[in-house]
Amino acid sequence: MISLNSSPAAQPFRPFNRLAVAVTLTFAGLCSSPAFAEPTLYVAGVGGSTEQMYKTKVIPAFEKQHNVKVVYVAGNSTETLAKLQAQKGRQQINVAMMDDGPMYQALQMGLCEKLSDAPVYKDLYPLARLSPEASGIGVVATGIGYNEEAFKKRGWAAPDSWENLTDPRYRQLLGMPPVTNTYGLHTLVEMARLRGGGEKNIDPGFKALKDEIGPNVLAWVSAPGEMDGMMQNGDVVMAVYGSGRAVALQGTGFPLKFIYPKEGGIALQIAACSVTPNAQSELSQAFIQYVLSPEVQQIQAQENGFAPVNQTVTLTPELAARMPYGPEKVNALIKVDWDTINQQRGEWTTRWNRTVER
């Protein structure tokens, strides 16, 4: 009788050998699959210098600390809001960072979850707590930027008021953002207030922009980079600016001066919320708290001109002078009524396109 083990050639086929190999390969595949990979957090925010700051100065430390991959989804605030609306109920974005106007719209639509309690929230200025679901993470002011050298050459005094926008000496030398841009919207509301109206009576603002400011405007410019280019080329010598945008242009060496009009600069907050529904709720809440930390608040001020909303942050006098820093400046900023504005914003945009920017 021949033994089954007498030679290798005589050994029978063993099905379990193939089964063992298959199980081993399957397990190896599972270990390298996304189920075992680090989680991914999708953070939406504006592009340009803000995107670069977050990618290089802010996100890497958070990724290392939490063993997470952060993907920055760039787009302006209106685009981010549109994405949240389109994805409602099946959100792909975890954290949304937007201007305060669109953020209030997101809150009204129920797109954000309640913020978790954390010690850092006790350190914030009162204006930063937009709602139980959203927090300001930085503040800038809408005011007036002007080319200091161009003004000196012409012998002109520095502007000091919103009323300067109506001065005929600036005919075709003024850059203005439209009302689809928050800076332009702020100007519309402020001119309405100065002419006896306000958010609930916007007609005087439209009249002032069309008849008093309009003749001075060389171009209505929405993109901040385009406004910077017109200023650098000498096409315009004055424009409505945000203090953060002014810091970025000043950083290139351009002689831009930013002023808070005597009537007041207007508060514009960059706000953040954890989107709902959210597959990474805990990480989203942690990211917002991280952005509010003194370390990141300092980075935002230094790199992008976002004044801290965390009251414990100390800035150098030189840096502090370039933004609405400290209780006195922050409390002096004019606030607008976003609830009223957002109810009428679509109508205002249509009216703007029809009567002002034609």
Image (cartoon, grey):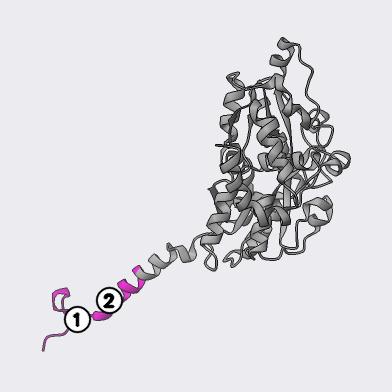
- State the residue in front, 355 or 1: 355
Counting residues from the start of the chain, the first of labels 2 and 1 encountered is: 1
Kindly state the secondary structure of the residue where label 1 is placed: loop
- State the residue in front, 297 or 170: 170
Q: Residue furthest left?
A: 1
Number of marks present in the image shown:
2
The picture quadrant where one finds residue 2 is bottom left
Q: Where is residue 225 in the image (x, y as percent from the top left)?
A: 57, 32
**Label 1 sits on residue:** 5
The picture quadrant where one finds residue 105 is bottom right
Left or right: residue 345 versus residue 129 is: left
Tell me: residue 303, above or below residue 285.
above
Identify the amino acid type marked 2: Asn
Kindly state the secondary structure of the residue where label 2 is placed: helix
**Label 2 sits on residue:** 17
- State the residue in front, 204 or 97: 204
Q: Residue at x 69, y 15 (%)?
A: 150
